């Protein structure tokens, strides 16, 4: 048999550094891969294998720039948006307060895979791939493809189908599959079968980790769009071979591509320092991430203290290492609908800030932001924020945000949160200048003038929505892409505009935008159950679905001490916007053989939809991203701070488990039936690229945003 030697992994440790790759021209990850990246990916994944059992089997569980495309599966556009989406009869939002176009745009080439072959394809090589160290007689040791039994390997990535649970769903332009598993043996075979391929893809390796070659995935994925691939993983002991241990299941390739880019918050410490947090980003299919924004590049400055007289840090609120008035935290971020900037919640006293994410002017303040709007963003006690393409054009550029009650615009928090809007182009004359001169009460005069100007501009430059019928606090709003409906969390406790770890109640409600006036609130049926917390809502790109977190209330189970914040038993659910029965994602559950402890939960959190919902042959395809603290390569504990609740994450004395990002598919058929798919681990998220080189930098990754960000491409090159 002719050997086909690939760029390969060799051992679990030192020999990884001895691998060599063929030299070639510079190219991006869309075309290939590099030694430094693949070696780090291998080291990262293999380092976690001791965490999982060797003897178990694989089994199962944003507003911005929406794209709603309906196709016939052949690249043609059919129908209109009122007929697209998952839920027949659900309003798409084309009312007087804003809306999306009344006819869908033709599908962009980037949204649909373009197959080059439909049968007998030769994307999979005819000969097996032999990784380094594999004996030439490896195929004979395994025998025919169906020759396996015994203790099945535990397949950790990607999750394979099992029983009635489907396997992972890959967008056709997603990261190439990484097969990570544990098994009894020292020699492994990975076999991938596709009905459209003339050959099976077969690889032999000495390590329980293998990545499909990028050129194979790039060619095969679009040709396999809308179909399954069957994966068989077998293991033998090469010194005394017998019946191979094996497992078989399917993964699926969607008939659509995923759109956009992801920007997420990465942290290593609970303390706020200049280096403790930053925003990282990448576009779909890129195999590394790059720094998008860090606090010291943000030009938005002169943040004002809560009482409005001094800059933060003059006598309180400042953290070591920061200039007085500088932005200190960039975590809870949201894309502007044009993808050019992010607006985020700063550190105490929870003001807003805005910064460009474009390569040419990263950190800069957008030109449309006026002085008056800049001052309004500096008000304290502002919760998380949302924006809509329905209100993102010249003359109507709005921010929707949580708004903590206070006596004066700049004054102490009074613990009663509402929802406010801010006109980012307001012409109101509101100064944010804090005098440096103490003479003649200059700071006091500026403080009083600022508060008076803000009060006078209420109703024109900013305002608070009427929430008729709301008896509690309103936090974490999300406005739909049409711009006519806001969903929010109704709760009994909300420190400084955020959901509280100590809250006893958290339910989803909606309120009409109603020309910035608000109105009567309504609970979302199925997402306002008093037995559960429902929080962190997010509208899908076509405004048909809501994703949200759901967890049992305190006392709702034997070990339920958490509120609606970093809840150990949080699960991602989806529901029609009009309400109904919530559907928990299969992706909430990690692979059961991975060794996670269900008693301490997985901390699934912060779901955000991709910026496109694409209908093909009667089914609408959605993708969403979320964070989870399930076991993963390089997981570590974040040391507790003085503000960390004692019971958070099971009270683990070593700290709170770090989290990672996962993607899951959601498909809705014409009857409204929802099918969800297992989680796909984003194995690129800790591969940080600087000067075209990738380095493994373990971090806790949280609060992802998925939108059409205007961030630069992430590329790695062969030198």
Image (tube, rainbow, N blue to C red):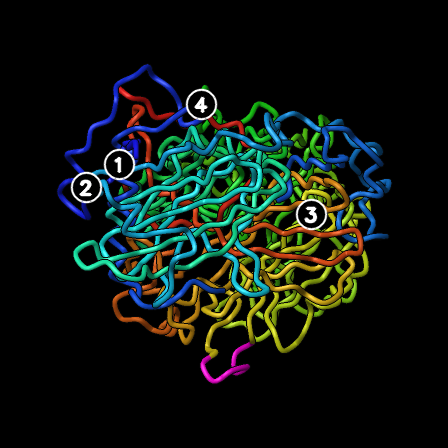
- Segment tinted magenta in the rendering: 553-559
Label 4 crowd bin: few (<14), some (14–19), many (20+), radius 10 Å: some
The residue that disc 3 covers is: 479
**Would you say the residues marked 1 and 2 are in contact, meaning their CB atoms lie under 8 Å apart?**
yes
Say what secondary structure mark 1 lies in. loop
Disc number for residue 133: 2
Foreground of the two, 189 or 644: 189
Earlier residue among tags 1 and 4: 1
Say what secondary structure mark 3 lies in. strand
Q: Is residue 558 magenta?
A: yes
Q: Is residue 226 above or below residue 555?
A: above
The residue that disc 4 covers is: 359
Residue 707 visible, this orientation? no
Say what secondary structure mark 2 lies in. loop
Where residue 35 appears, as percent x and y from the top left, is 26, 30
Earlier residue among tags 4 and 2: 2
**Would you say the residues marked 4 and 2 are in contact, meaning their CB atoms lie under 8 Å apart?**
no
């Amino acid at each position: 048999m002719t050997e086909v030697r690939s760029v390969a992994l060799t051992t679990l440790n030192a020999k990884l550094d001895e691998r060599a790759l063929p030299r070639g021209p510079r190219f991006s990850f869309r075309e290939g891969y590099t030694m430094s990246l693949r070696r780090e990916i291998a080291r990262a994944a293999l380092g976690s294998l001791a965490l999982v059992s060797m003897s178990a089997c694989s089994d199962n569980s944003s507003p911005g720039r929406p794209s709603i495309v309906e196709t016939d599966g052949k690249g043609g556009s059919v129908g209109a948006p009122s007929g697209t989406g998952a839920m027949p009869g659900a309003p798409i939002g084309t009312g007087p307060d804003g809306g999306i176009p009344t006819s869908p745009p033709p599908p962009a080439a980037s949204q649909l895979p373009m197959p080059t072959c439909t049968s007998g394809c030769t994307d999979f090589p005819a000969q097996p791939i032999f990784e380094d160290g594999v004996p030439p007689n490896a195929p004979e040791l395994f025998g025919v493809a169906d020759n396996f039994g015994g203790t099945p390997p535990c397949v950790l990535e990607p999750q394979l189908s099992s029983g009635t649970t489907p396997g992972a769903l890959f967008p056709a332009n997603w990261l190439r599959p990484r097969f990570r598993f544990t098994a009894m043996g020292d020699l492994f075979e990975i076999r991938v079968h596709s009905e459209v391929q003339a050959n099976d893809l077969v690889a032999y390796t000495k390590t329980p980790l293998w990545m499909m070659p990028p050129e194979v995935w790039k060619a095969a994925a679009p040709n396999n769009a809308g179909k399954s691939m069957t994966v068989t993983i077998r293991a033998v002991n090469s010194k005394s071979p017998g019946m191979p241990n094996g497992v078989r299941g399917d993964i699926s390739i969607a008939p659509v591509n995923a759109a956009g880019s992801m920007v997420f918050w990465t942290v290593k410490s609970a303390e706020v320092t200049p280096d403790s947090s930053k925003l990282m980003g990448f576009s779909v299919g890129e195999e590394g991430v790059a720094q998008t924004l860090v606090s010291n590049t943000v030009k938005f400055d002169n943040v004002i203290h809560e009482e409005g007289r001094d800059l933060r840090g003059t006598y309180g609120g400042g953290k070591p290492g920061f200039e007085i008035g500088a932005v200190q935290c960039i975590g809870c971020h949201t894309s502007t609908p044009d993808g050019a900037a992010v607006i985020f919640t700063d550190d105490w006293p929870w003001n807003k800030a805005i910064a460009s994410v474009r390569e040419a002017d990263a950190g800069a303040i957008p030109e449309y932001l006026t002085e008056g709007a800049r001052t309004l963003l500096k008000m304290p006690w502002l919760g998380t924020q949302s924006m809509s393409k329905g209100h993102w054009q010249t003359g109507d550029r709005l921010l929707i945000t949580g708004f903590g009650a206070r006596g004066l615009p700049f004054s102490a928090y009074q613990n009663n949160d509402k929802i406010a809007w801010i006109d980012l182009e307001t012409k109101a004359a509101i100064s944010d200048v804090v005098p440096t001169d103490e003479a003649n009460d200059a700071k006091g005069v500026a403080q009083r003038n600022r508060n008076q100007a803000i009060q006078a501009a209420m109703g024109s430059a900013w305002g608070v929505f009427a929430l008729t019928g709301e008896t509690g606090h309103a936090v974490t709003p999300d406005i739909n892409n049409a711009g006519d409906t806001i969903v929010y969390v109704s709760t009994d406790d909300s420190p400084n505009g955020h959901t509280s770890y100590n809250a006893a109640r958290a339910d989803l409600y909606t309120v009409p935008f109603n020309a910035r006036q608000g109105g009567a609130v309504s609970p979302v049926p199925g997402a306002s159950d008093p037995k559960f917390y429902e929080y962190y809502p997010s509208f899908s790109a076509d405004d048909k679905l809501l994703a949200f977190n759901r967890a049992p209330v305190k006392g709702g189970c034997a070990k339920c001490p958490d509120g609606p914040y970093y809840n150990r038993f949080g699960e991602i659910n989806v529901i029609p916007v009009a309400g109904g029965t919530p559907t928990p994602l299969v992706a909430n559950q990690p692979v059961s053989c991975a060794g996670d402890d269900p008693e301490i939960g997985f901390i699934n959190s912060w779901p955000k939809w991709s910026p496109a919902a694409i209908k093909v042959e009667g089914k609408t395809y959605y993708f969403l991203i979320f964070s989870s603290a399930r076991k993963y390569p390089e997981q570590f504990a974040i040391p507790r701070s003085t503000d960390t609740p004692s019971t958070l994450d099971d009270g683990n004395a070593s700290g709170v488990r770090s989290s990672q990002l996962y993607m899951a598919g959601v498909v809705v058929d014409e009857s409204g039936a929802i099918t969800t798919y297992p989680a796909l681990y984003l194995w690129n998220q800790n591969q940080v690229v600087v000067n075209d080189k990738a380095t493994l930098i373990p971090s806790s990754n949280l609060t992802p945003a998925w939108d059409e960000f205007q961030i630069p491409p992430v590329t790695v090159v062969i030198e």
